Amino acid sequence: MYAFRTRHGPADLCFTDRFGGVSAPPYDELNLAVAGEDDQVAGRRNTRLLLDDFAPGAELCDLQQVHGADVAVVEADGPVARPVADAAVTRQADVVLMVRVADCVPVLFVAPETGAVAAAHCGRPGLLAGVVPRTIDTLRAWGDASITAWVGPHVCGACYEVPAAMQDEVATAVPAARATTSWGTPSLDIGAGVRAQLEEGGVTVVDVSRCTRESGDLYSYRRDRDRAGRLAGLVRLRGPA
Ligand SMILES: [Zn+2]
């Protein structure tokens, strides 16, 4: 179920793998996609299994992700609608922020001093649009506290081949993202770009990533195309015991 799971101050956070769910091949097992060819009943069951294990009784705030830079601020108690955004921040206890990915970079943030958490989804468009810096800015609006960010599983720079012109476009804006595939062609390292943006924003980075394309226990769009499921990053503030 978990590729990584930890506690940090008042928060729990995790990145999922493909095990522990009910989806049939080729989406087996814990496919958390909300679209695609997989059985939607299985998808909802997978989300329930995950939430019941990760944060029983908590509310879910997941996102309609559009590769943009909008950050949803979740302040209300109770059931949370699915905002159109690629990041969410909250100070509400027992609201699970969740981002879905299959090669893009999931990032989870905890600011213990202000009691805030955030989750962001960042692919190539999000790196250019600045979803990670905007998430940092939104957290800092609640106080200039220390922030730690966990960078989860995504496709690595040695695997993410792109046309040379696309590499130039991205690397002009975020030089750290320029990379080369293991077979010697132009590529992008979106994770390196995200880490650079985090460090520029004064955030402590904990990189717990592995390459999704190279890891059969993780979902990868580059590897499996339309037969790829989605994994997720989740973070929540614990409520009073
Ligand atoms: Zn790789």
Image (spheres, rainbow, N blue to C red):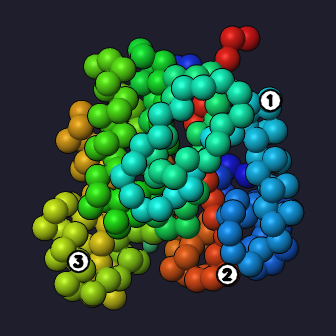
201 is higher (above) or lower (below) than 212:
above
Q: Residues within 10 Å of mark 1 (few under 14, many from 20)?
A: few
Within-10-Å neighbours for mark 2: few <14, some 14–19, many 20+: some
**Amino acid at the residue labelled 1:** Gly
Q: Position of residue 138 (x, y in %)?
A: 35, 33
Residue that lies at the very extreme toward the top in this rendered image:
241
Q: Is residue 62 left or right of residue 172?
A: right
Assess whether mark 1 and mark 3 are in contact (beta carbons under 8 angstroms): no
- Spatial CA span between label 3 and label 2: 26 Å
Which three-letter amino acid code belongs to the residue tagged 2? Arg
What is the C-alpha distance between the residues marked 3 and 1?
A: 44 Å
Q: In this picture, is 183 found above or below 27?
A: below
Ligand 1 is within 8 Å of the C-beta of the residue at disc 2: no
The residue singled out by tag 3 in the image is 167
- Marker count (numbered): 3
- In the picture, the quarter occupied by the C terminus is top right
Q: Residue at x 47, y 34 (%)?
A: 73
Q: Which residue is mark 2?
A: 227
Q: Nearer the viewer, mark 1 or mark 2?
A: 1
Q: What residue sits 29% from the left and 57% below the top?
A: 129
Q: Is residue 107 visible?
A: no
Is 241 above or below relative to 14? above
- What residue is shown with label 1? 57
Q: Secondary structure at mark 1?
A: loop
